[in-house]
Amino acid sequence: MSRYALPPMTAVSAMNLSSFATVAAAPSASFHLRHNLADTGSGAQAAPYCQSPDIIQSDMPVLNPHLVLPASDCWAQAYNAAPVGDLNYYYVRGRNHSGVAVSPQVSFFALPAQLIPWPSLWGRPIPTLDGQTRASVGRIEPGEVGVTPTPFRWIPAPLPATSSFHTLVAMSTASSAAAAAPVVHTLADMAALLTSTPGLAINQLTCLDADNGPWLVRLGLKVPAELTDMQPITLLLSGCGLHGATVGVLGDTFTAGRQTLQLAPQVPPDGTVIGFSAELEPGYDGSITIQVWPGARPPADGATLTLQAMYPVPQDLVAQAARRGTLAPAGRHLSALGITPRALSPLGEVTISFSRG
């Protein structure tokens, strides 16, 4: 591998539990971008949904990316996609799961971290190194992996106080024109976009030093004003390898009903889910903080803490949600929270990973 190749990072394990077009386009179903390393594209897509290994950051252009990034050892790796403070180059890869050759176009977006990555927040696509608003991958035969030959070039602006890291989004389309972000007006459509859209990849993973606690992570929580089917949002928190760490969640803004978004500090045992429900309203604009205090010993190398936003699917829409593939197997956890189990669909998730060395 050349000196321009990306340094390998430990693979992220799958968790159990204008020149800018104004017409939105649907993500391509044929050029598959993975949710996580375990996502094979051969069946129902499963959580985590926001740990895509196919959004790849580099400090400099990669020599022969079409040879380096699809290689089996690289394909099996997830890389730290967080931008450096200066100039960043991003590549996007995917696999053709259709039965015919495709020539996909890929757009790339970056925004301050949002628990629910609504497309209305994505902003303008980031241009490629040669100034285009999308990258043409070229002809990809059935079963082959394709990579954007020209990277997206990005110098991130300073983050606002409400976000500690970035949300990264890649979208493939079959159109030759640069596409605006999809239009989403309902919770059901947001759930479908997140969970069952093969042409969409989202990375909302932030890595922290396991030996440098306590830790504080901030991210936005917004609800578009145009949303038409608002339901209570359930926030679920789960961890693995935290070694007795105490975790709390706190919002910075009261809801219209004067509710505080808060999960009191507690020690969640591995493999359990804790959480609460919030009556958010269309137009809600706030942020939440996840605070973690180490236990008797620091979190394990590779420990994770994931916060999910879910919505309870109305009974008359459960069959439709099942057909769209958006139902999550999280209902069994709700009785422990004092909530009557209901069908749930994910809207967004953020994972905090702890590492050392």
Image: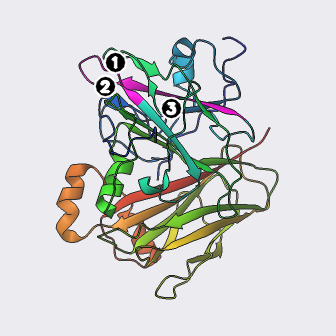
Q: What residue is shown at x 65% (from left), y 52% (from top)?
A: 165
Which of these two is toward me, 189 or 79?
189
Quick one: SS at disc 3?
Answer: loop
Residue at the spot of label 3: 54
Which disc, if any, is residue 97?
2
Q: Is mark 1 on a helix, strand or loop?
A: loop
Q: How far apart are marks 3 and 2 (CA)?
A: 15 Å
**Residue 19 shown in magenta:** no
Measured as percent of width and height from the top left, residue 193 is found at 35, 49
> Residue 57, percent across and down?
63, 32
Disc 2 crowd rating (10 Å Cα; few below 14, some 14-19, many 20+) is many
Q: How crowded is mark 3: few (under 14 residues within 10 Å), some or many (20 or more)?
A: many
Q: In this view, does 160 lie to the left or right of 127?
A: right
Q: In which quarter of the image is the C terminus?
A: top right
- Can residue 165 be seen here? The reply is yes
Q: Which residue lies furthest to the front in this view?
A: 18
Gap in angstroms between the C-alphas marked 3 and 1 = 16 Å
Tell me the quadrant of the picture where the N terminus can be found. top right
**Residue 143: which quarter of the image?**
top left
Q: Give, as a single range, the part of the protein colored magenta.
A: 87-105
User: Is residue 89 a member of the stretch shown in magenta?
Assistant: yes
User: In this rendering, is residue 337 above or below 143?
Assistant: below
Give whichever of 126, 80 is nearer the camera. 126
Marking on residue 143: 1
Specify the quadrant of the image occupied by residue 333.
bottom left
